[in-house]
Image: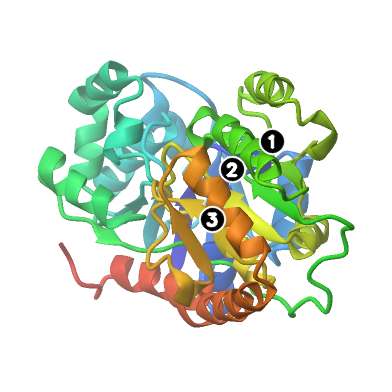
Amino acid sequence: MRLLHVIEGLHPDRGGPPQVAVALAARQLAAGHEVAFASHDAKSEAVGEFLRGRGLAACERIEVARCGPLGTRAFAAAMTGTARPDAMHLHGVWNAILPQSARWAREAGVAYGLTTHGALHPFPMARGRWKKWIALASTHAAMLRGARRIFVLNDEERDAVAARFGASAETLPNGVDVGPEPSIRSRRERPSLVFLGRLDWTKGIEALVAAHRRVIELGLDCDLVIVGNDWGSRGSIEAAIDEAGTRERVQVVGPKYGEEKRRILAEASLLVHLPRYEGFGMAVLEGLAVGTPAVIGDRCLLPGAGPSMGVVVTESNPDSFARAVVELLREPDRREALSRAGRHAVVERFGWDAIAARCVEALSPMGNRR
């Protein structure tokens, strides 16, 4: 089967969607399918390095020009000389490349599916809602109606899609790459808490800084390491650190990838996440995969989160979060049990092979339809 993944940007700094799209494509290529990407930045060197690192050096990449009303024509032009795909997988909702490519697919008789990456949950829908409803009224509603399958990250979003758009959706988790178990989980002198993700308002990092201060006030000296690319919140995070008076115990280190990211996670005592909203929590899985248990707020909608997955879930406020962190750091045996449970759960439930195969099945000519 020939699959075309359509996504606005493939650079790894763009967060979860390119990580997911590339992981799916890599598994589908390994399973014997042909894969290609249509993206605005498909020819950048950083993207090429990203694809090569995931075993996609031979993957065809199609650059699609940025344009407005003539976007469908531009998409069709980009497909000229390219083998017609059997199916297309669209990633995201609000980027202009998506309704353009969906329209081309409908005109060409090519089935397509769409992974929302959490974009249709009520929380992100409330931000910039008028622009989004205008987009739905003009181009995006047809894109959603025409999809063979809509994949969402959690049941709340699935129910919202049914209620708001009259469309059925399937909850499909993201996966994670599981490498060898690290021989050393923590090499730091003091306990360390690690946040991994983009520095964005939705991630609630300012509240996490406040929770870290409360941990110290409760008598546990520990570090907070903030890892991620700045999406506009670096200034407010730095201000929160200054207000908390914890500058000597907080590091904001920027984005990390590959083995360096894996090392930072493996050295952490806990992975911590206290978001305003998180549609899935892929970074949590990455920590669990290297044996680092997690403490998360209850607005992180990771399916099945709990002790059997190596995760402690708290109320989404700094005080409750801090108490949970302190209790866990003071119980090494419990922390070790969560470490084993988390890695086991990731291996058993969140492998990319099964997730990639499900996407192919849903989009194949013989796949079940909505």
Q: Amino acid at mark 3?
A: Ala
Image marks 1 and 2: residues in contact by CB distance under 8 Å? yes
Image marks 3 and 1: residues in contact by CB distance under 8 Å? no
- The 10 Å Cα crowd at callout 3, few under 14, some 14 to 19, many 20 or more, is some
The one nearer the camera, 99 or 91, is: 91
Q: Amino acid at mark 1?
A: Asn
Where is mark 1, residue-wise?
229
Pick whichever of labels 3 and 2 is earlier in the sequence.
Answer: 2
Left or right, residue 299 beside residue 177: left
Q: Is residue 181 above or below residue 232?
A: below
Quarter holding residue 55: bottom right
Residue positioned 69% across, 26% down in the render: 244
Where is mark 2, residue-wise?
15
Pick whichever of labels 1 and 2 is earlier in the sequence.
Answer: 2
Q: Is residue 189 above or below residue 118?
A: below
Of marks 3 and 1, the one in the foreground: 3
- Residue 349 seen from this side: yes
- The 10 Å Cα crowd at callout 2, few under 14, some 14 to 19, many 20 or more, is some
Residue 98: horizontal and vertical position, in percent? 39, 37
Where is mark 3, residue-wise?
324
Residue 177: horizontal and vertical position, in percent? 63, 70
